[in-house]
Amino acid sequence: MFKKLREARRQKALSSGYQIIVNVEKLETRVAQLRESKLVDYTIERTGDENIVGSIFKGRVKNIEPGLKAMFVDIGTDKNAFLHFWDAIPAALDKGLEEVRRKKSQKSQKKPKYISAKDIPSIYPVGSEVLIQVSKGPIGEKGPRVTTNITLPGRCMVLMPLNDQFGISRRIDDPKERQRLRKVTEKMNVPEGMGVILRTVCKGQRARFLIRDLRILVSQWEEIDQQRQNNKAPACVFREPELVERTVRDFLTDEVAEVLCDDEQTVQKMKDSVAKISPQSRKRIHFFATKQPIFERFNVEKQIKSAFDRQVWMPCGGYIVIDETEALISIDVNTGRNRGGKNNSDKMILETNLQAADEVARQLRLRNIGGLIVVDFIDMKGRKDQNAVYRRMLNQTDPDKAKIQVLPLSQLGLMEMTRQRLNESLSRSMFNDCHSCGGTGRIKSAESISVELQRKLSGLIQRGDESLTDLVIFVHPEVMQRLKEEDANDLVEMERRHHGRLTFRSDPSGAREDFKIVCQSTGKEFTS
């Protein structure tokens, strides 16, 4: 009876909250976040991978580039870190935060000196030491991007040890709750010169939980400061926790009904980690023993595969097409099988666009893609419908941990967005570019290769070199098939005019676009 009751409570919690599934393997740890059994967030961490986003380094300025308004800092990694002048200026509070005014002590009554970008080269000359935090990991050929605005995230708040500003997340929209948190903030015994930001998870939390979180973060900063004093640059003074610990810290909120993991040691590790900040949350972390792989048991594996599809279908019958390029992400919305009625075309278009907004927000988070994003929605005549799609996109992107800016639809039906890009996207971290196509997804047809080959042979023949009378040509089997079936007469005619011999051989080891011409008498090679 009690077992059925617990299961009923669990199902009720799952219907309104999130579920986190953790799969631990020898080479890889995977974390999936589900809502109503639908995958909304997916992260992987492989053995040997080094995630430095959030880590704090004591670096040394190597060179300053006034034209770029940036400096390069040696932090001990393969590539020097990129520090823009603007990232070296004390940061103002984000727009998503409400500033909280606190009574300052006599020591801090003096107004801080205003610092501009022009002052940065004199504050941090070449060879000077600087404490920085990685804000964006190395992507492609670019090194990590860093900032001097250090933040230490906790469960309930973010500590800013070098900035004395205070703020509350605007996602807490209850006026009474905001007023309560303001009072709690004013009474907090925050060390001089430090500031805090109360996260959304603070909603409904008792003051003692916030104070405990603050105490943990201040203690953490004291350890970092000690490391900074004891180590010479370049040195890492704080390493961001591994994936499982980050998951417990960032995602185990009241909205999460349960955390299920298939590894007992990891479960215990998560419980020990969360016990420091929220002992009650330990009850929501469970070891899930199953003969079937845990990701298959909860239908996660199938949903992960769809995260790499270019075309994603929606419940209404429409679909979106996602193309990831170097400069931007383009997303096209199509009605697909959603035809609607003759008199309901506007309703059908609105329905498709609204579902597209849901799916776009989900896919951006799931694939971890960012930068500049352009969504081509189906044209809508009414401004009311356009605003409905815009509001839907704002609501769906709100839970995303990455910073997102969304602009209203333009006259052409395009929506421009930016999403903070901290690391490589999911596809780029899991796939290598194809050797044949270079990542474009297209290779030349056998006909095109045949034309290029015959053009190359004609060019060699026209040299009039007698040593080029006996040639051996190596081509891919698919191209060989084309030469035998459709181009044989042309090659015989070329051989007749050449007064020599052309020998063709199949070479399956090479790419389809590659061919090689070898002169029998000299051994000289000519390639495509």
Image: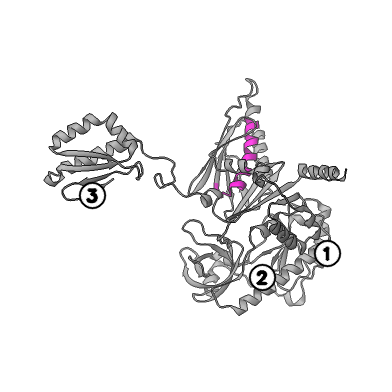
- 10 Å neighbourhood of mark 3: few (<14), some, or many (≥20)? few
Q: Is residue 447 magenta?
A: no
Please identify the quarter of the rendering in which residue 507 is found. Answer: top left
Q: Which residues are magenta?
A: 349-372
Q: Image check: 194 left or right of 504? A: right
Please identify the quarter of the rendering in which residue 269 is found. Answer: bottom right
Residue at mark 3: 525
Please identify the quarter of the rendering in which residue 93 is found. Answer: bottom right
Q: Position of residue 451 (x, y in %)?
A: 27, 36
Residue at mark 2: 162
Kind of residue indicated by mark 3: Glu
Q: Is residue 43 above or below residue 275?
A: above
Q: Is residue 444 above or below residue 145?
A: above
Residue drawn at (24%, 37%), measured in percent from left and top? 454
Kind of residue indicated by mark 1: Arg
Residue at mark 1: 208
Which quadrant of the rendered structure holds the N terminus? top right
Q: Nearer the viewer, residue 18 or 368?
A: 18
- 10 Å neighbourhood of mark 1: few (<14), some, or many (≥20)? few
C-beta proximity under 8 Å, tags 3 and 2: no
C-beta proximity under 8 Å, tags 3 and 1: no
